[in-house]
Amino acid sequence: MSMEILKVVVLIILILSMPAGLIAVVLGLPGTWLILVTSLLYSWLTGFSVITYQMLLGLLVLAVAAEVLEFWSGLWGSRRYGGSKKAMMGTLIGGFIGAIILSPMLFGFGTLVGAFSGAFAGGFVLTYLEQRKMNEAVRVGWGGLLGKVFATVFKGAAVVTMIGLDLWAIFFAQNA
């Protein structure tokens, strides 16, 4: 296979990874990394002339920020709404367990529903077991849920930004 054909094939893979990465984020999967890896591959094949080192660094920063924020936001939400360290861990573990359990349901959207409901349930259950106060437990669970929703929205925005940067570099930056 010639280098030009390989570049076209990888460009097609990169373009297909864009909606796949966005869908992955909605499903609670690491779509940021999918886009980053395919961008890196295309960049390498084009000698870093289309997607530059600087752009790759920017994409890496966006991906890392989105993943870190996703991890910490449920914890932050739980804590912000009065949860203890145990409740924060419950939010984190509940989100993971919920995502795993509900993954096969709702045509893939079970992962997202499971992550949200699991974050709520984890914070709720551990707060209730600690304090035996229903209102407080609901409040902490709600905080964990809001944190998880915020993270998903932020991660989606990061992926859309990554897609926009890639498309701009591929189709417009060379002509500017």
Image (tube, rainbow, N blue to C red):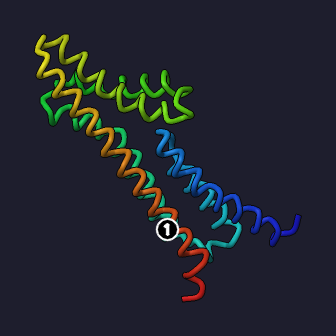
Q: Quadrant of the N terminus?
A: bottom right
Q: Which quadrant of the structure image shows residue 167? A: bottom right
Front residue of 53 and 74: 74
Report which residue position mark 1 lands on: 164
- Looking at the image, which residue is at 44% across and 35% down? 112
Q: Quadrant of residue 149?
A: top left
Residue in the image at 55% along x and 68% along y? 166
Residue 102 vertical placement versus 59 (above, below):
above
Q: Residue at x 69, y 65 (%)?
A: 11
For residue 146, above or below residue 96: below
Q: How many marks?
A: 1
Q: Secondary structure at mark 1?
A: helix
Q: How far across and down, in percent of the image, does residue 115 sit? A: 40, 31
24 sits to left or right of 38: left
Looking at this rendering, what residue extends furthest in the front direction? Answer: 106
Q: Is 131 left, or right, of 40 in this rendering?
A: left
The quarter of the image holding the C terminus is bottom right
Crowding around mark 1 (Cα neighbors within 10 Å: few <14, some 14 to 19, many 20+) is few
- Res 12 → quadrant: bottom right
* Residue 154 in the figure: left or right of residue 60: left
Q: Position of residue 89 (x, y in %)?
A: 29, 24
Q: Residue furthest right?
A: 1
The amino acid type, in three-letter code, at marker 1 is Gly
* Residue at point 12%, 22% (across, down): 136
Where residue 62 sits: x, y (%)?
A: 42, 57
